[in-house]
Amino acid sequence: MSTYDIAIRGGQVATSFGVTRCDIGIKDGRIAAIAESITDAAQVIDAGGLLVLPGGVDSHCHIEETSRGGYTMSDGEPQITVNEESFVTASTSAFAGGTTSVVCFIPQWKGFGVWERYVDARKRGETGMLDFAFHQIISDPTDVVMKQEVPKLVAEGVRSLKVFLTYEPLHLGDAEYIKVLLAAREHGCLVTVHCENFDAIGWRTRALLDAGMTAPKYHAWSRPRVVEREATHRAIALAELVDQPIQVFHVSCEDAAEEIARAQARGVKVWGETCPQYVTLTAADMDRAGFEGAKFMCSPAPRDTAEHARIWEMIRRGTLDIVSSDHCGFSYEGDKGKGSAGRDASFEKIPNGIPGLAARLPIIFSEGVSKGRISIEKFVELTSTNPARLMGLYPKKGAIQPGADADLVLWDPAKKVTITNALMQHAIDYTPYEGLEVTGWPISTIRRGEVVMRDGKVQAEPGTGRFLPRGPYDMVKPRGITPDGFGA
């Protein structure tokens, strides 16, 4: 009998610590050995000329989220999801792009609890092939939810709470946000925050509509940088008041990133995330004929090319240390996606969100490593190791070391590919990155020692994904520092 199930031989193994030519031995779905040469294996995978990377960890994905007000209802239960991606199609897309684990979202509807939604989301997740964890969205922090149901979720392994400071009907006011921060502190959770000012956006939107400015391009006008900067400052200030660690999601501009940097310099536990759309797309993409600009609508809105350079600088500085996809797909054609309010709808009625699961790693590698903006080690940190650490999944995920799950990607750093929607292999009928040429592409994806994608062909079986419960971890422990030493 062979010592190892699989040996990956001849590759340049890249981690957040460096790049080394070595072999990897896999046994029972885990990395069992890393050595100069491994020959005693039942199967050998030749990685000559390729990089071997840890499987991507995407810590911000909207997959198969149910909506109480869905398009069809039966016996009061939701039958249509907020977006069109199922866990099966999302798994296919993720594997095609080199991602092996995700953290996605459990919804909460105003007036309802969260436990039943967790049970439903868990069942849905187990139909797919990705390994998955959850953030719990809190849109209605009642005493029952925060004192009875959240502790049950934490016991199940849900260790992060998501809040929105904008969007109707999801947004929380300051008092509600503080309530979530306090519950997270009590139960050892991270809080993740969508930072934009709800009232400012509402005021600006009404003014634009009154002026007859309704096209998709005015989505960016309705939420300029200042509303993101203000909300980021406020979210951090209140978290500092409570002494609760937070992550600021999808930072689109230097203004917001600077608020994070200032807080980090004070020692506050706050982390910043950005996404591929904020280093590739611009507000000008929404200024297209007819309804076409709706394809590029997400929030915060893409800015301009000058902002791309500033975001890269914030990445190099470490202020923004995770790149997620914020995958939230709505198809362009038909009447259930971007066009659900009609093709002549004003911008505020068009669903926000763009697909990006499969595009994330190729875009960041190409725009970052291939163009000399970041190192391979930084790429691994941004797309795998750092999200695994912050989400409490490391070293099981995001690492190439003995004992870690054998989640690996064989990557051709020189391969040039033009992105098309077909290559994304998702359920959405378009990609906002259509026609973008990238240098660097995944050749094979391995999840827990099983080759689940080879040369673009996904071969995993539905139902093989695993839930990733998260226990307590030091990274999200409060500092023990509050104003005047009063813990409230």
Image (tube, rainbow, N blue to C red):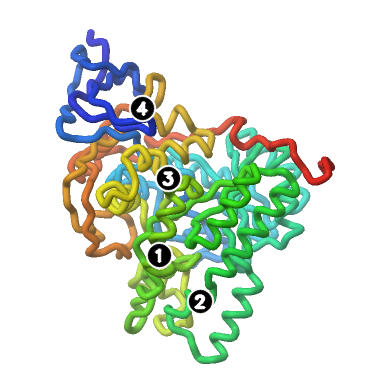
Mark 3 and mark 1 lie on one chain; the one further toward the N terminus is 3
Mark 1: amino acid? Phe
Question: Where on the picture, by quarter, is residue 7?
Answer: top left
Q: Helix or strand or loop: what does disc 2 sit on?
A: helix
User: Can residue 303 be seen in the rendering of this structure?
Assistant: yes
In three-dimensional space, the C-alpha distance between marks 4 and 1, rounded to whole angstroms, equals 35 Å
Residue 191 percent across, percent down from the top left: 62, 47
Q: Is residue 29 left or right of residue 262?
A: left
In three-dimensional space, the C-alpha distance between marks 4 and 3, rounded to whole angstroms, equals 17 Å
Question: Where on the picture, by quarter, is residue 36?
Answer: top left
In three-dimensional space, the C-alpha distance between marks 4 and 2, rounded to whole angstroms, equals 45 Å
**Residue toward you, 441 or 254:** 254
Mark 4 and mark 3 lie on one chain; the one further toward the N terminus is 3
Of labels 2 and 3, the one closer to you:
3
Residue bearing mark 4: 400
Mark 2 and mark 3 lie on one chain; the one further toward the N terminus is 3
